[in-house]
Amino acid sequence: MSKKRKWDDDYVRYWFTCTTEVDGTQRPQCVLCNSIFSNADLRPSKLSDHFNRQHGGVGGHDLNSLKHMPTPSDQSETLKTFGVTSHEDALLQASYQFAYLCAKEKNPHTIAEKLVKPCALEIAQIVLGPDAQKKLQQVPLSDDVIHSRIDEMSQDILQQVLEDIRASPLKVGIQLAETTDMGDCSQLMAFVRYIKEREIIEEFLFCEPLQLTMKGKDVFNLFRDFFLKHKIALDVCGSVCTDGASSMLAENSEFVACVKKEAPHIVITHCLLNPHDLVTKTLPTKLRDALFTVVRVINFIKGRAPNHRLFQAFFEEIGIEYSVLLFHTEMRWLSRGQILTHIFEMYEEINQFLHHQSSNLVDGFENKEFKVHLAYLADLFKHLNELSASMQRTGMNTVSAREKLSAFVRKFPFWLKRIEKRNFTNFPFLEEIIVSDNEAASIAAEITLHLQQLSNFFHGYFSVGDLAEASKWILDPFLFNLDFVDDGYLMKTDLAELRASGQILMEFETMKLEDFWCAQFTVFPSLAKTALEILIPFATTYLCELGFSSLLHFKTKSRSCFNMSDDIRVAISKKVPRFSDIIEQKLQLQQKSL
């Protein structure tokens, strides 16, 4: 790390003053044009070069003369020392607003000084004239300035979230997931769900790199240290939803053991979003071989550039809609279902292409049994895609997610009964190609075995099931039968009173379930607390998956060493920085530095 330069009062002769960042870094700021330079420019040669080239080079002022410069009466109080008019406040505001938009659009910091500002100056010169161009020229938009602005806005957003967490009337829910970025660095991302002003809020919490190993203990240490750093007890967490390798984040991992040891009350849940891997693990040998054959065919076409070009040309020649295949790992969600569907729909054309290329995959691919297995897999994964897509939204709670999962598993007995009668209505691709009784009998036996194993795995892995009967009043307190509630249940009286209110009934019919119970916090606190403790925990890591998609914009080959923690917070957080407070604090630091 390079050595930081220090401010010298003699530098005022070049009409510069010193600004001090939150981390103590000193940076020179031109009093005449308000431009802020990096700490590396804090030396006479750089300052004099700017002064001579931009402002005519009339120097020689000392610190006292700069402090006592005459000022107009309408200038900002915090900038009187600098002799800068209130117009400079607007320039500073413009700088922050542009940095905010830059982060929101996930653009590199250099876009301001290399593209946006030159374009703006040209437009101002042509449309508004040279005076407007001179004003725009004064807006500080250098790479270092944009980076500094984003860091300050990120810290302000983080402070807002931490204040909300401390003020939440109930324990918060955490969503935690890990991925590897373009630079082969493991990134841990977290979102938080809490209550604020009669509403459940979902917010970005942090994205931090795992520096060395990626064990469950390392994940826990990073997770715990974040709360310790910001002086928040880990007890504020009520639940943690994880998704990842079994050794790192699964329900029986070292991470979970550490969490339970530190805070035993925390409820650990596993993401319900992606059951595809579980389905793959339960596949019988022949079905698994068929899936691997599909992967090998895709790799043969996509993994070799000449084959891929020939494949595209071949499909264009015969006029087929699909000409591009995705690797089965290129999409985080729904990939296998879409790939299997595309392969099945392009089966004849791909078979021709493999023959044309004399591939050794032809024998296995054109086998009739393989096509039957492919049809079943395409149908099954299509059902799974529909299930996953129904849970891919913000605000998904564990009750709704488990209801969807339970409804999916309850379809299995009906499917099995139809399959016993050689009725493949629920598997349209399979029904399309089954032509003989022998084929139907063979695949029916394999499907029956697989669906039975899959049902058992779903119940064991995701704990499929509805709410306890006595707790179903949370879903609908007005239609719920109070006879299921024990007379000793203290909240039974509150339930009866709530059901008697016509106004509350209208609220229930017009509001989301979570918002309804938040609204009852002041009137029926016990009921609301019990309901929200069940509704607050995350059911999926969907927000983290969205965050990982944003991560691809920040961590690229050209920005592989870029620390994007602050940028990604500004980009995906719903919080808006408190610009007036940030600017006021910055101006106060500038004033103190004199």
Image (cartoon, rainbow, N blue to C red):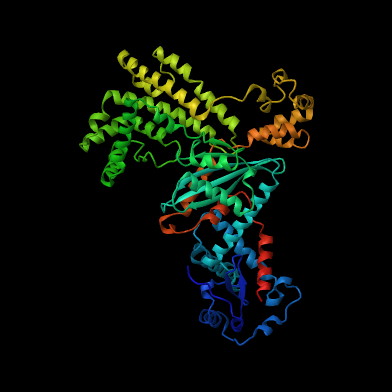
In screen coordinates, is 479 left or right of 142? Answer: right
Residue 541 appears in the picture as rendered: no
In screen coordinates, is 525 left or right of 184? Answer: right
In-front residue for pair 136/319: 136
Quarter holding residue 586: bottom right
In screen coordinates, is 312 left or right of 232? Answer: left
Quarter holding residue 362: top left
Residue at (54% x, 53% y) in the render: 568
**Residue 394 position in % (x across, y down):** 58, 39
In-front residue for pair 474/138: 474
In screen coordinates, is 591 left or right of 148? Answer: right
Relative to 473, residue 560 above or below: below
Residue at (63% x, 66% y) in the render: 92
**Residue 321 position in % (x across, y down):** 36, 36
In-front residue for pair 268/345: 268
Residue at (47% x, 42% y) in the render: 248
Residue 302 appears in the picture as rendered: yes
